[in-house]
Image (cartoon, grey):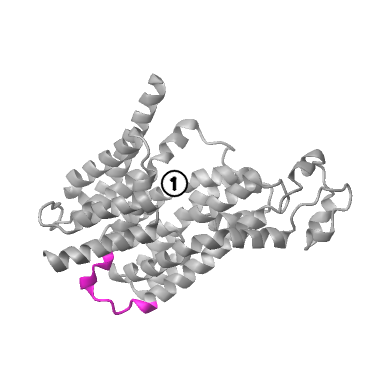
Amino acid sequence: MIWIVMIIAGLLNFASRFVMLSGLAPAKLPEKLEEALHFVPIAVLSAIIVPSVLPGDTGSVVFADNPRLPAAIMAVVVALITRSVIFTIAAGLATLWLLKWLVY
Amino acid sequence: MWVSYQAFLLYPAYNSQNDRHLDGTSVMQSPPNTTYPSKAREFWQGVRDETPLMLAVIPFGLVFGALGLAAGLAPLEVILLSSIVFGGASQVIFAQLWSLGTPAFVVAGSVATINLRHVLYSASISRYVRHLPLGWRVLLGYLLTDEAYAISINRFQNGPPSPHSHYHLLGTGLTLWVCWQAATIIGVIASNNIPESWSLGFAIPLTFIAIVAPAIKNRADIAACLTASMIAILGQGMPWKTWIVAAAIGGILAGWLVHRAKARSA
C-alpha cells in the first residue's frame, strides 16, 4: 500500500514540474491561478505545523505545559534571521531538549 | 565567463552545425565573437553554481533519513522516497502524514498540493527548454527542484542565450539529486538506533517553519498562514484528516482574497 501511495505522490510531483514543459499546457498560466499558487506553500505548511507543534491526544491541541511551543517560537526567530533549514532545525531541537532537561 | 553576451545579440543567427560538436570551445569561428559556452562548460558551471547549496541540502538529507525512520517508515521506504518523490518538503509531509495513519488519498493530495508551486517553476523555464526533445524535457522536469530552479533560472535569464543552456540545469539538477540520495542513505544508516526520546520527529514541523517563516512577507501571506492554522486547529475532529485539505484551501483563499482586495484599493 505504501508503495502505491509513494508512486502516486511521485507521479503527481513530477506532473507539477513537467506540466508546463509538456507542450500541452498553455504557455502562460491565468493570472488568478498564478496569484493563488503563491499561497500554496504557506497555507499547506502552516496547516501541518500548528497541530504538530501543539499535539494533544486524538484530535485536540495543547498550549499549556508544552515544550514544543517555545521551541517552535525559537525556530521561527532563527528561521527569520538565518533563512537556513539546518540552523532552524538545530535551534528548535536544542531548545526542546534544553526545556525537557530543565523543566519538564 | 559569458562575455560574449552582447556580441551574441548582434549576431543572433548561429550556425546550427555547431550544435553537433560535443565540445564547443573551438567552434564558432564565423562570425567572430559569437561563441557560446560548450555543453560541458554549461554542465560544470551548473555543478559549480549549485555546490554551495549542498551545505544546506546534505544535512537536510541526513535529517530526512533520520526523521523518516523516526516517523515509522522502513529504511528502504525512506531511501526510495528520495528518488521516487524527490522533494524535501513533500517527502517530509509524506512521512509525517503516513505516520499519523492518514488515508492514502489525503497523503497523495497533500503532497501534490504542496508541489503545486513547481508549476510556477515549470512555467518560468518552459520558454528555455520547450524546443528540446521529450526525453530531455522529462529528465529536466524530474530534476526541477527549488534549489536547481533558483540557480539555473538566473543563468537562463541573465546568462547569454545559448542552445546549450539546458546543460546548466542538468548540472544543477544532477548535483542536487546525487547529494540528496547519498545524504538520505547515510542518514538512514547513521540514525538507525537513535532513541525516541530525542524527539527527532519534531524536525518535521521545524523544517516547515524554516520554509514558511521567511516566506511570509505581507498581509496576504499572514492571512493565508493564520487562516490555515485556525482551520487546522478547529478542524482536528474532521474525518480522514481532511482538515489538512480544508486548511490548505481556506488559507489559499484567504491569502488570495486579501491580495485581491489590496490590489483593488491600490
Q: Quadrant of the N terminus of chain B?
A: bottom right
Q: Residue at horizontal 61%, vertical 55%?
A: B169
Q: Is residue B194 magenta?
A: yes
Residue B69: image quadrant is bottom left
Q: Which residue is mark 1?
A: B116
As drawn, the residue found furthest toward the right would be B30
Label 1: how many residues lie within 10 Å, few (<14), some (14-19) or many (20+)?
A: some
**Residue B236 pos. (x, y %):** 18, 49
Question: Is any atom of residue B202 visible in this view?
Answer: no
Viewer-side residue, B80 vs B108: B80
Residue A35 against residue B176 in the figure, above or below: above
Position of A97 with respect to B145 (left or right) is left
As drawn, the residue found furthest toward the top would be B265
Q: Is residue A8 magenta?
A: no
Q: Quadrant of the C terminus of chain B?
A: top left
- Which residue range is magenta in the image? B189-201
**Residue A45 pos. (x, y %):** 33, 49
Question: Is any atom of residue B249 visible in this view?
Answer: yes
